[in-house]
Image (cartoon, grey):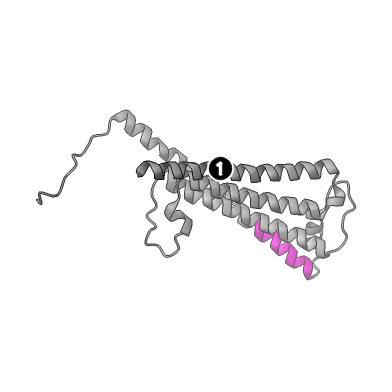
């Protein structure tokens, strides 16, 4: 054996510490449940998309479903497929995609951070952000995804602004601004922590 090699003794982990460490696998059913939720969103996406395509080609039941989906209680119900109706349906599809992206970040990033390494370093399809993911990075990315989802909902509200009162519009705008400020606060705290750790190393 080379004298320069230093072999660390194998430490035996106690029962309680090992039990606590193994408890991280209790999160596995949660991530599997989120995968099932992802399947529900995929099914919902294709149902909405097929109804939109059917409505374009004159299918009466598909048109009925689309008009019911975009109708706002207390306002006149649209009676045909117009530009605004199509826009609202497409925004709904984008909303589903963004929520699906959020689920992927939580499932993959959460599993990698809190449960076990996935060893995807050599995989050609490894997400770029996964190579440097940690709890702080994951929180910032989740906050940005939530802002994107909130933006879609706010845009859908403003398209039908005449159907809502001023309090509802102000409330939704205030909630969106709160999400923005929260994301900025999380990013700022993460930057402070990163700077502090970098200075401590030097």
Q: Position of residue 182 (x, y in %)?
A: 62, 42
Pick the residue in front: 87 or 180: 180
Q: Main secondary structure of the magenta part?
A: helix
Q: Of helix, strand and loop, which one carries label 1?
A: helix
Q: Position of residue 108 (x, y in %)?
A: 48, 51
* Residue 124 on the magenta segment: no
Residue located at (84% from left, 51% from top)? 161
Task: Say above or below: 81 vs 191.
Answer: below
Q: Position of residue 147 (x, y in %)?
A: 64, 49
Q: Is residue 28 visible?
A: no
* Residue 49 on the magenta segment: yes
Q: Say which quarter of the image contains residue 84.
A: bottom right
Q: Position of residue 88 (x, y in %)?
A: 76, 58
Magenta segment range? 45-57
Q: Is residue 49 visible?
A: yes
Other-residue count near label 1 (Cα within 10 Å), few / some / many at <14 / 14–19 / ≥20? some
Q: Say which quarter of the image contains residue 123.
A: bottom left
Residue located at (42% from left, 65% from top)? 124
The residue at which mark 1 appears reads as 186
In the displayed structure, does residue 162 sit left or right of residue 152? right
Residue located at (82% from left, 57% from top)? 67
Pick the residue in front: 124 or 132: 132
Task: Report the quarter where the C terminus lies.
Answer: top left
């Amino acid at each position: 054996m080379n004298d320069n090699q230093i072999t660390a003794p194998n430490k035996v982990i106690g029962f309680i510490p090992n039990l606590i460490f193994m408890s991280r696998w209790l999160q596995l059913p949660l991530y599997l449940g989120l995968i099932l939720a992802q399947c529900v969103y995929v099914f919902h996406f294709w149902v909405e998309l097929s109804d939109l395509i059917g409505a374009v080609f004159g299918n009466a039941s598909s048109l009925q479903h689309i008009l019911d989906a975009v109708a706002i209680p207390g306002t006149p119900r649209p009676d045909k497929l117009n530009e605004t109706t199509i826009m609202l349906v497409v925004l709904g599809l984008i909303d589903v995609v963004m929520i699906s992206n959020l689920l992927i970040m939580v499932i993959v990033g959460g599993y990698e951070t809190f449960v076990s390494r996935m060893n995807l370093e050599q995989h050609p399809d490894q997400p770029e952000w996964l190579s440097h993911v940690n709890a702080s990075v994951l929180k910032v990315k989740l906050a940005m995804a939530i802002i994107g989802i909130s933006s879609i909902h706010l845009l859908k509200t403003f398209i039908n602004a005449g159907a809502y009162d001023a309090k509802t519009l102000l409330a939704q705008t205030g909630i969106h601004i709160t999400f923005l400020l929260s994301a900025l606060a999380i990013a700022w705290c993460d930057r402070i922590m990163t700077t502090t750790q970098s200075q401590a190393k030097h």
